[in-house]
Amino acid sequence: AQSVTQPDIHITVSEGASLELRCNYSYGATPYLFWYVQSPGQGLQLLLKYFSGDTLVQGIKGFEAEFKRSQSSFNLRKPSVHWSDAAEYFCAVGARNDYKLSFGAGTTVTVRA
Amino acid sequence: DVKVTQSSRYLVKRTGEKVFLECVQDMDHENMFWYRQDPGLGLRLIYFSYDVKMKEKGDIPEGYSVSREKKERFSLILESTSTNQTSMYLCASTPPGQGSNQPQHFGDGTRLSIL
């Protein structure tokens, strides 16, 4: 079964600074990988996904993520953070033969002025 | 846009009560999911359904059951609530695909408190 680790529980970043959120997964084959964002009081919204092909994927809100098979990682980045990016971010992994996703514990991002 | 609607945003119940959490999606999706979200644990799958009247247990089904009588509606049932079921409950849906390659669309969640 697949699993996900998000090593950082909480990150604080200044507005305008860059952001990187880490995600490590465990799965025997090529996984399906996702990043979701949850703003306070809301459900999860898909930021981006990776299935195959180009290992650098672009998402909404200016986010990108890079799949590195050798490191079993799928880190999320944004070059310049806006105050509206304050939220909780979840990495998730899925498989070709299963409907289910496994989610990480989440990383809370605080943006300071 | 896909709309996944959960019937209640906040619920407060007493231990031992029976609780129904309702979820409706408007995009004719085959697959529907119920998760609970707890701080530090992320989302954990309770049950999912891949068709009407079909269901499968997720990772933490104990204390829960589900019902899917119509394609658009997926209900989570807590037969006799306990305080450890205080949590945020999230519903999601996806169309059919190859495994989990279809992104899940989430409702806004129901925050359930059991006193």
Image (cartoon, rainbow, N blue to C red):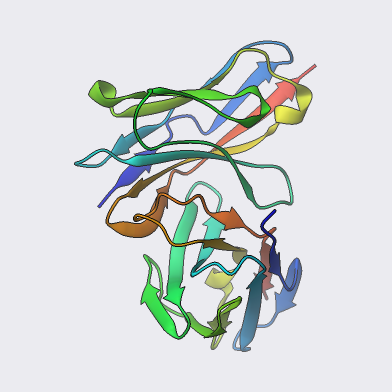
Above or below for A31 versus B26? above
**Looking at the image, which residue sits at the far right?**
A113
Closer to the camera in the image, A37 or B53: B53
In which quadrant will I find the C terminus of chain B? bottom right
Closer to the camera in the image, B65 or A45: A45
- Judged left or right of residue B8, residue B31 is left
Q: Residue at x 34, y 33 (%)?
A: A52
Closer to the camera in the image, A96 or A9: A96
Q: What is the x, y in percent for residue A10?
A: 57, 30
Q: Residue at x 45, y 77 (%)?
A: B51
* Residue A89 figure quarter: top right
Q: What is the x, y in percent for residue A48?
A: 53, 35
Q: Residue at x 77, y 24 (%)?
A: A83
**Looking at the image, which residue sits at the far left?**
A28
Above or below for B83 versus B66? above
- Judged left or right of residue A94, residue B47 is right
Above or below for A45 versus B20? above
Closer to the camera in the image, B13 or A50: A50
Above or below for A76 versus B51? above
- Judged left or right of residue A39, residue B69 is left
